Amino acid sequence: MSNPIDKLSAIALPGLIETDYQTRGYHYCLEATADNILPVVQTFDDEGFYLEDLTCVDREKQLELVYFFFHYDRHKRFKVVVALDPAQPSVPSVSGIYSSAYFLEREVCEFFGVFFAGHKNLTYLFLHDAIDYYPLRKDYPLRKERVAVSAAEKARLNSFAVTESDDSFFVNMGPQHPSTHGVLRIIIKMDGEYILEAEPVLGYLHRMHEKMGENRTYQQFLPNTGRMDYLGAISFNLGYVTAVEKMLGIAPPPRAEHIRIITTELNRIASHLLWVGAYLADLGALTPFLFVFDDREQILDILEAVTGSRLTYCYFRFGGMPDDVDETFAEKTKRFIDRMHNERFSMYEKLITGNPIFISRTKNVGVVTRESARKHGVTGPVLRSCGLPFDMRRVEPYSLYERFNFDIPVGGGNGALDMYRIRIREMEMSLRIIEQALAAMPAGPVMAEKVPKKIKPPAGDIYHTVESPRGELGVYIVSDETDRPYRMHWRVPSYFNLMTFPESARGILLADAVAVLGSLDLVIPEIDR
């Protein structure tokens, strides 16, 4: 296996710098230009990296286009920066190399005004047509340079591939279709009952969390984390506080780390349970929905007692926890573990896993290959369904996950059926982690000493990842030493997993589109942010 650094050195680059991974979250940083970004990105593609994220930072005197590349096997992260003139920011599109860039570049274009030459459809992704400024620029809303695309919807339809069929027609799936579980719209081009093309339409729940991050203190932004992935809110809460703690050099006490892991894994199980029930309901089986929500209610009772909430959790604090847990919390959690092991998993095995109708609806439907996953930046159960044991709890251990024994369930390329089986096994693994954390939880404080009242991280940036119920969550923060982030960006897994749907849906029956879309376990507020 070749070394990407050697290949990158052959390209005319100003510098390739090895960084402090512990404080920055990436191993190497390099500067590229609009002239050489294509060969740089092609090098990462040739070496098997996936485009982990793409965002922009307005430095006022220049725009910094920031690319992150990561590898499923080698676990090395590269940050690539391209400086652009704010007056005429233009750079070649890399969407021809990485499929994930198709959406990422559209997002950067509408929020920062960067033009990606060669992109086939730079229409609005989240915003409405009347917006004629760039909301994430620092001078917002003073800049009025962009001409609104009044025919954006027509352009989106016209961007679909032309087929030889004269009988094609368009249908809308959503934005209120019950299987979307949020306000997602899919424009589908049909030939009879078969799908020719599918284009997701986003933005119905867009709330500008990243702009809010620039206008709130680090503490004030904490509640926002529970408003993105409302089903896996604790993972988002954990990702944010641990990113800031790394910037500050703060280590939470061991007891606080154990409580964080227990509650995060309980929330992961609750998220997976809701997905199982909703997915089966989408496919026409309503009985499992009642059982899984019964189990989920047990978790919500446990978490409500310690967090004060049943859904949009804001539980963790910088440096630890606001309060300790008592023995009642531990006893209820142990009873729930026994309930799942002794009763529920065996019931789900009989009710769902071995059900021939369920198997026929999901087996070999929505199959995602490893290469397609890499091109789209897929993570989580969707990635693991193609046999790759990639989990950020193992790949880049955070908190105390490296101390616990658990397996990473993988599939065998059976598509939606494997994604179901993986999530069932992941719930079993979460219970295993919780048991170990409860047994090893020490006494002691739950808040670190000398945590500053005003959070002002040192100047610099960090890219920090955790494993949410849907895959890799990345938090990118740029600090200018004030009590508010200079730039905050969220890499959310549902956004990338959704990108596989247009490819997976091509050529399938419309009836199978629900099975494919549902298997991705999308949370739309997370995508829209």
Image (tube, rainbow, N blue to C red):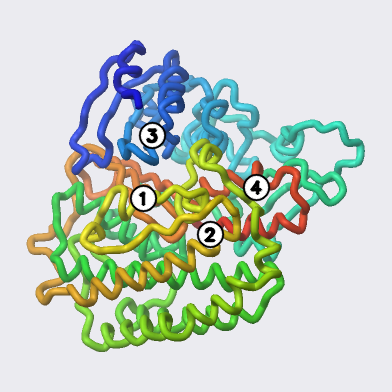
Q: In the rendered image of this protein, does residue 473 appear above or below residue 267?
A: above
Q: Sequence order check: which comes first, mark 1 or mark 4? A: 4
Q: How far is disc 2 from disc 1 in space, using C-alphas?
A: 21 Å
The residue carrying pointer 3 sits among few (fewer than 14), some (14 to 19) or many (20 or more) residues within 10 Å by Cα, namely: many
Name the residue tied to disc 2.
Answer: 523
Q: Earlier in the sequence, mark 3 or mark 4?
A: 3
x then y, percent, for residue 39: 44, 17
Q: Which residue is mark 1?
A: 213
Locate the N terminus and report the quarter of the image it occupies: top left
Which one is nearer the viewer's eye here, 385 or 92?
Answer: 385
Disc on the earlier residue, 2 or 4: 4
The one nearer the camera, 278 or 358, is 358
Q: Quadrant of residue 477?
A: top left
- Name the kind of residue labelled 4 in the image: Val
Q: Name which residue type carries label 2.
A: Val
* Residue occupying image coordinates x 11% and y 76%: 443
